[in-house]
Image: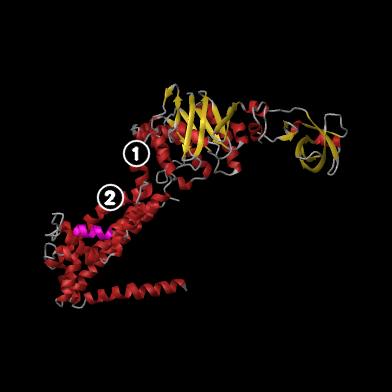
């Protein structure tokens, strides 16, 4: 009964729309599909998307873990405030995030740093909107982590860095990886935060989602659907890979 | 190697965990820190290991002041109640951790780990993960891990506390034998007086953040210096001003001038031992332990009145407070 509801719900909400997109992408046959995803502009857009998404999740993996560490292990005034702050990028409409970043780091920004219409700008926007994923994945694991393992390592002669690298980090890796996976999937498809700051110059600063939007605007629905299918497949593979990896990593943890 | 703690005080906020504790632990001994929970015994052990820093006082290991030395530089082995196993490493990885941190050659580590696995009777389990071991096996792995680095002292914090009674009894005997083989100065924290008496050659009784008495198990049982120690290391009765062990109570049918009259509330036969619960006429419950023969000769049953006198008793100056 429960399973039936869950499956029907998921089908209606996720599977059927996705299937429709896939169907649409094959409107002109396999040849048209192939042409659409191998067009120079589409390839450039997808390559850029992959690159900036990777950049963003690498930064997220490191900074997210660090922030989670500070939130769990350190005591300071304003900790609750910081904890709430983490989720704000998520609550904000992403277009507002893009607007803010453009205003701050754009051509006439008050800080004198202009990263608008550059790959760094796109990466910054992606980091901003995917910030919570790694933090929220690592935080509970760190809270549950047995402090005595670290004390045992210390009594065995391990310094703080060795203890972190050999005892703490391996325990956090599954959580970091899971956060990274979600960040990466989100980054692959992000539109709102990117569209303003990217400048959307074809071949240079046009990401896949913006390319898709452009195609729809200019009646290239089939090409849009085809690139969407590639993005979807990439996301799915990332999530699948992570799930397999997580299972392996957590096999021996009780 | 000997351990010397001098005037150690440790506060956690408003709570005092150790209050001016001084203790000397001779090299090669197996000493138990015995006390109820919250008595400060674990904190003292953690101060010796360097896992806590004392607010006042100093700690010496083998004559060297280690008060400011970090735990990783103290060369102590520490075993935790809940094993603190490195879950993502095999048994081998766990036991060899201290050696690999010291950058010993792989072959050497392997050899030493094999030796230790044999010592703790875990041969053949080296490639398992901690989650695939029983509690008793995990704790033996933790012991091997602590012993791998040839620590100057071995510190055990309630090491058998998380195990069931049968495994606990087995591991106690095993630890005793191990200590006879390895001879490293060992300090064992426990709240179980029977465990302390069975395993340790010296016991330090702690209560309320203070050291109450240090001595051999026999000394503590026979010559306790205060009512708390007397009550903690064995059962005790209060008879007037004096404290009497249940087996030191003599029960008589007729009074002889020094006896106290008491009513028999309950007689429990436990095989060789017969336990008699009494209520003194002047108020206050008593418990007497008799052998089966003594009980038969006396021929008492519930509701009888008997006359009680101590064979051996202890009176403490200002003694109050069991």
From the viewer's perspective, is A128 left or right of A198? right
Do the residues indicated by labels 1 and 2 lie within the same chain of the protein?
yes
| Within-10-Å neighbours for mark 1: few <14, some 14–19, many 20+ | few
- Residue B268 visible to an observer of this rendering: yes
Element assignment for label 2: helix
Q: CA distance from mark 1 to mark 2?
A: 18 Å
Q: Is residue B156 visible?
A: no
Question: Mark 1 or mark 2, which has the lower sequence index?
Answer: 2
* A220 is higher (above) or lower (below) than B249: below
The local crowd at label 2, few if under 14, some if 14 to 19, many if 20 or more residues have their Cα within 10 Å, is few
Locate residue A133, reporting x and y percent. 31, 58
Q: Residue at x 46, y 72 (%)?
A: A2
Where is residue A186 drawn, in percent x and y? 27, 63
Quarter of the image with the C terminus of chain B in it: top right
Depicted A221 relative to depicted A63: above or below: below
**Chain ID at mark 2:** A
Residue B311: quarter of image:
top right
Give the residues in magenta.
A122-130
* Chain letter behind tag 1: A
Q: Is residue A39 left or right of residue B295?
A: left
| Residue B296 counted in the magenta span | no
Magenta stretch, main secondary structure class: helix
Residue A62 disc label: 2
Residue, disc 1? A160
Number of callouts in the render? Answer: 2
Q: Is residue B277 above or below residue B62?
A: below
The quadrant where residue B115 appears? top left
Helix, strand or loop for disc 1:
helix
Residue drawn at x 32%, y 60% is: A87
Q: Position of residue B75 (x, y in %)?
A: 41, 29
């Amino acid at each position: 009964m429960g399973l039936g509801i869950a499956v029907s719900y998921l089908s209606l909400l996720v599977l059927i729309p996705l299937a429709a997109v896939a169907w649409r992408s094959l409107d002109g046959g396999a040849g048209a599909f192939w042409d659409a995803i191998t067009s120079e502009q589409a390839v450039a857009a997808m390559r850029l998307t992959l690159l900036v998404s990777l950049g963003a999740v690498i930064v997220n993996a490191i900074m997210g873990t660090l922030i989670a560490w500070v939130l769990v292990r350190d005591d300071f005034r304003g900790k609750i405030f910081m904890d709430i702050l983490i989720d704000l990028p998520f609550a904000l409409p992403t277009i507002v995030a893009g607007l803010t970043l453009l205003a701050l780091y754009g051509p006439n920004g008050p800080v004198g740093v202009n990263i608008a219409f550059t790959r760094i700008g796109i990466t910054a926007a992606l980091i901003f909107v995917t910030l919570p994923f790694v933090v929220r994945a690592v935080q509970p694991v760190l809270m549950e982590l047995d402090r005595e393992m670290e004390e045992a390592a210390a009594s065995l002669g391990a310094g703080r860095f060795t203890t972190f690298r050999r005892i703490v980090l391996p325990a956090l890796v599954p959580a970091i990886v899971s956060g990274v996976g979600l960040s990466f999937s989100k980054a692959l498809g992000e539109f709102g935060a990117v569209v303003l700051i990217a400048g959307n110059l074809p071949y240079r600063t046009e990401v896949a989602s913006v390319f898709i939007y452009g195609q729809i605007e200019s009646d290239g629905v089939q090409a849009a659907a085809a690139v969407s299918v590639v993005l979807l497949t990439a996301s799915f593979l990332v999530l699948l890979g992570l799930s397999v990896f997580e299972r392996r990593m957590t096999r021996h943890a009780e | 190697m000997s351990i010397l703690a001098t005037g150690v005080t440790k506060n956690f906020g408003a709570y005092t965990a150790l209050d001016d504790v001084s203790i000397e632990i001779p090299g090669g001994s197996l000493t138990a820190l015995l006390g109820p929970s919250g008595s400060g015994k674990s904190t003292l052990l953690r101060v010796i290991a360097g896992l806590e820093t004392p607010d006042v006082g100093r700690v010496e290991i083998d004559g060297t002041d280690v008060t400011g030395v970090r735990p990783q530089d103290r060369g102590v082995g520490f075993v935790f109640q809940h094993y603190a196993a490195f879950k993502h490493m095999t048994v081998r990885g766990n036991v060899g951790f201290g050696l690999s941190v010291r950058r010993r050659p792989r072959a050497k580590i392997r050899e030493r780990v094999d030796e230790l696995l044999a010592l703790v009777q875990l041969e053949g389990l080296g490639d398992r993960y901690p989650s695939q071991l029983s509690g008793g096996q995990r704790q033996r792995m933790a012991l091997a891990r602590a012993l791998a680095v040839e620590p100057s002292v071995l510190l055990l914090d309630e090491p058998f506390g998380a195990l069931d009674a049968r495994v606990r009894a087995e591991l106690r005997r095993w630890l005793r034998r191990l200590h006879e083989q390895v001879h490293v100065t060992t300090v064992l924290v426990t709240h179980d007086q029977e465990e302390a008496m069975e395993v340790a050659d010296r016991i330090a009784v702690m209560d309320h953040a203070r050291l109450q008495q240090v001595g051999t198990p026999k000394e503590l049982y026979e010559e306790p210096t205060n009512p708390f120690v007397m009550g903690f290391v064995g059962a005790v009765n209060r008879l007037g001003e004096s404290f009497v062990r249940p087996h030191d109570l003599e029960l008589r049918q007729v009074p002889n001038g020094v006896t106290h009259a008491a009513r028999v509330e309950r007689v429990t036969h436990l095989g060789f031992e017969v336990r008699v619960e009494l209520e003194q006429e002047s108020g206050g419950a008593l418990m007497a332990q008799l052998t089966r023969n003594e009980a038969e000769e006396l021929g008492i049953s519930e509701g009888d009145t008997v006359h009680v006198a101590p064979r051996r008793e202890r009176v403490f100056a200002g003694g109050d407070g069991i």
